[in-house]
């Protein structure tokens, strides 16, 4: 009788321990499967025209057509108060890599630099010669680039607000529609309304390499994390991947609708492509195949941005809504987390099955008095001394 009680007790304890291990291992997979979260739209707010994560991934900024810049707490979805008022319709937002600045651009050419910690703006806004369509900080946070409707790219020194050299490409036809620095800052890519992408050396102000020409206006540019690819989205629905070192076209991806934004994940192999039809598609450049099914954002998407760790994707829409997606749940093939989730989930399932089997077998043996021929095997496999 004592042996039966001892077997039953050990069986229950072992089963509980195995189940606990399974739950711990399964937690990352369960967290990755969380449903996309939407950030509430403030009453009266208009479309989102830019989204950006802070470098620590804790805040998400959205620029709105009503002139507001809203900061959201990523973990809770809470809106920071007070709302930053930029004045004119916001056309783009960007955090500095060091996290000390948040820039917002207006359609009237005004650029405001905010302290995201206090919500205070610099004493004097930066004023471009024409409307600004996009802004980007250099990797070392010392320069701020502004894409202008007059075809120029203006660089400002963030330390003193002074213009850094002559405007790049002043007078170029088509207007600048997008800008992005390469990962180490030696190149600045500028997309134009005539379908061209030009690469500039921000230190010298000189053009680098040949003109990268596509069809339709450029709507977004982004460098891959290693700097070996430059993605450019076009109004004709094509995303072209260029080799910035040679100027050669590496690949053309047809999305089926006008592209409104592109973004590379900082980790893993993932390129997000947003469309005017509200669909966000993902591509794995290394595998040269889609990374997963398209996401239905609901309305026209105006921009996309990845969190610094690549686990989240934010999209802004013409309806003023911002949605946050868990990349490992929707695009496991390119998130860099898929193999972890598969292995961990498999281990969790195996441990859970083992827990059930061990518990049931031990209880049966205890009840039967251990008369089964399998008792010897059971006792030899027990992990503590009988």
Image (cartoon, rainbow, N blue to C red):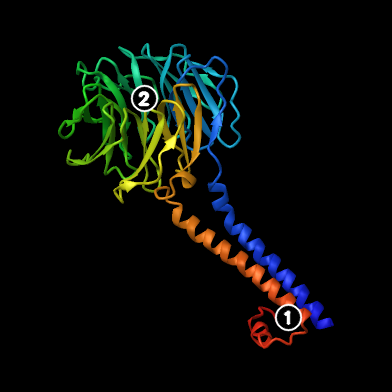
In this view of the protein, can residue 97 be seen by the observer?
no
- Rendered position, 370 above or below 87: below
Query: Does dot 2 land on a helix, a strand or a loop?
Result: strand
Query: Does dot 1 land on a helix, a strand or a loop?
Result: helix
- Where residue 70 sits in the image (x, y, percent)? 52, 23
- Between residues 246 and 41, which one lies in front from this camera angle? 41
- Between residues 251 and 189, which one lies in front from this camera angle? 251
Judge from the rendering whether residue 63 lies leftward or rightward of residue 19; answer left or right.
left
- Mark 1 or 2, nearer chain start: 2
- Rendered position, 368 above or below 97: below
Residue for point 63% across, 81% down: 381
How many residues crowd mark 1 within 10 Å: few (<14), some (14–19), many (20+)? some
Look at the image and tell me in which quarter the C terminus lies. Answer: bottom right
Residue for point 42% across, 48% down: 335
From this viewpoint, which residue is outermost toward the left?
Answer: 210
- Rendered position, 29 above or below 221: below
Look at the image and tell me in which quarter the N terminus lies. Answer: bottom right
Judge from the rendering whether residue 355 lies leftward or rightward of residue 263; answer left or right.
right
Q: Which residue is mark 2?
A: 135
Judge from the rendering whether residue 120 lies leftward or rightward of residue 375; answer left or right.
left
**Total tally of numbered discs in the picture:** 2
- Where residue 183 sits in the image (x, y, percent)? 33, 39
Q: Which mark is residue 365?
A: 1
In this view of the protein, can residue 375 be seen by the observer?
yes
How many residues crowd mark 2 within 10 Å: few (<14), some (14–19), many (20+)? many
- Between residues 94 and 318, which one lies in front from this camera angle? 318
């Amino acid at each position: 009788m004592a042996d039966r009680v001892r077997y039953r007790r050990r069986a229950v304890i072992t089963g509980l321990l195995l189940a606990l291990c399974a739950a711990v291992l399964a937690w990352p997979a369960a967290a990755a499967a969380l449903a996309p979260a939407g950030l509430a739209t403030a009453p009266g707010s208009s479309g989102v025209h830019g989204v950006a994560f802070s470098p620590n991934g804790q805040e998400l900024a959205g620029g709105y057509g009503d002139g507001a810049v809203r900061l959201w707490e990523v973990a809770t979805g809470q809106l920071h108060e007070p709302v930053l008022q930029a004045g004119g319709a916001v056309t783009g937002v960007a955090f500095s890599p060091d996290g000390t600045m948040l820039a917002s651009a207006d359609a009237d050419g005004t650029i405001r630099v905010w302290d995201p910690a206090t919500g205070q703006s610099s004493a004097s806004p930066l004023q471009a010669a024409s409307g600004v369509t996009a802004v980007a900080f250099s990797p070392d946070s010392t320069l701020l680039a502004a894409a202008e409707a007059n075809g120029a790219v203006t660089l400002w020194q963030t330390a003193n607000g002074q213009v850094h050299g002559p405007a790049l490409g002043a007078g170029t036809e088509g207007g600048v529609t997008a800008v992005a620095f390469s990962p180490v800052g030696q190149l600045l890519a500028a997309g134009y309304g005539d379908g061209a992408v030009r690469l500039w050396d921000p230190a010298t102000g000189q053009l680098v390499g040949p003109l990268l020409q596509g069809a339709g206006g450029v709507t977004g540019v982004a460098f891959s994390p290693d700097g070996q690819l430059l993605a450019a989205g076009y109004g004709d629905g094509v995303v072209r991947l260029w080799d910035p070192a040679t100027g050669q076209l590496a690949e053309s991806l047809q999305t089926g609708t006008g592209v409104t934004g592109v973004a590379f994940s900082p980790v893993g192999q993932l390129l997000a492509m947003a469309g005017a039809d509200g669909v966000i598609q993902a591509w794995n450049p290394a595998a040269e195949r889609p990374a997963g099914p398209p996401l239905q954002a609901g309305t026209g998407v105006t921009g996309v941005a990845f969190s610094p760790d690549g686990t989240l994707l934010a999209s802004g829409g013409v309806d003023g809504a911002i949605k946050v997606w868990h990349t490992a749940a929707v695009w496991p093939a390119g998130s860099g987390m898929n193999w972890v989730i598969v292995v961990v989930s498999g281990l969790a399932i195996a441990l859970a099955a083992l827990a059930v089997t061990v518990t049931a077998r031990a209880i049966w043996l205890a009840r039967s008095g251990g008369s089964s021929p399998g008792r010897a095997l059971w006792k030899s496999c027990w992990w503590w001394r009988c």
